[in-house]
Amino acid sequence: MNTSTKIHENLSLENINGEIWKDIPYYEGYYQVSNFGRVKSLSRKIWNGSGYFKSKEKILKQSKNSEGYLMVSLSRNSILKSYKIHVLVAICFLNHKQKGSTKYKVVDHKDNIRYNNRFDNLQIISQSENVRKEIKSKYLIGAIYDLKLNKWRSQITIKGDNIYLGLFNKEHNASEMFKRAYENKDKYDGDKKAFKLYLRYL
């Protein structure tokens, strides 16, 4: 592999030194994810509408979403779904559960680099711990790019309520609004309109 190539860009079937593969839950026999954050489609028989053909094993190409996270699309029973790579790695190698007792747990990148999905760069922490960590970092948070509107959307979840904070032309403006809302989250009493009005006049 070219040393300048990021791990997720390596589409060679040859294993990276130390790479371990595990079945992705619900997709056993279909797809596997590695401890380095690569995903591969397994060789299998596929129905094309008129008969079966055998697909070849291959490493799947990953793409970035509007938040900068790497994504991959998986298919089973003709249903295509997109998944965040770091979540798949955490499920298979860190025993992360998305439901039940870990409802408020999230998968965090220790180095804040969202394309570095090696299992040893991931940790399971609470949502509040994750926000505090990101606010202290140099990275912009709380800003999601809206492709249709060509603007940055800011929103925050407080006490289980998803609060829309507005659309902005600049990413840093959306991020600043998110940080302002987070720093004043104790002021939120369930009234979204009153909370947003309070933030506006800070």
Image (cartoon, rainbow, N blue to C red):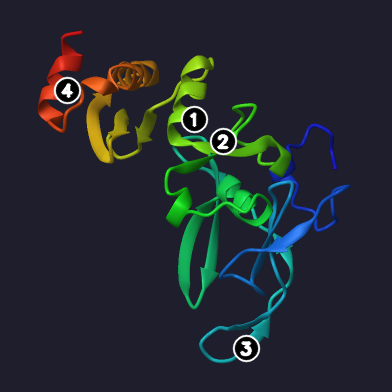
Q: Which residue is mark 2?
A: 108
- Separation of marks 1 and 3 at Cα, in angstroms: 46 Å
Disc on res. 196: 4
Q: Are marks 1 and 4 in contact (CB under 8 Å)?
A: no
**Considering only order in the chain, which callout, 4 or 1, is on the residue closer to the N terminus?**
1
User: Residue at horizontal 62%, vertical 36%?
Assistant: 115
Q: Are marks 1 and 2 in contact (CB under 8 Å)?
A: yes
**Considering only order in the chain, which callout, 3 or 2, is on the residue closer to the N terminus?**
3
Q: Are marks 2 and 3 in contact (CB under 8 Å)?
A: no
Residue extending furthest toward the top: 202
- Separation of marks 2 and 4 at Cα, in angstroms: 28 Å
**Which type of secondary structure does the marked residue at label 2 adopt?**
strand
Residue 39's place in the image compared with 116, above or below, is below
Kind of residue at badge 3: Tyr
Q: Which residue is mark 3?
A: 52
Q: Nearer the viewer, mark 2 or mark 3?
A: 2
Q: Residues within 10 Å of mark 1 (few under 14, many from 20)?
A: some
Q: Residue 190, can we see it? A: yes
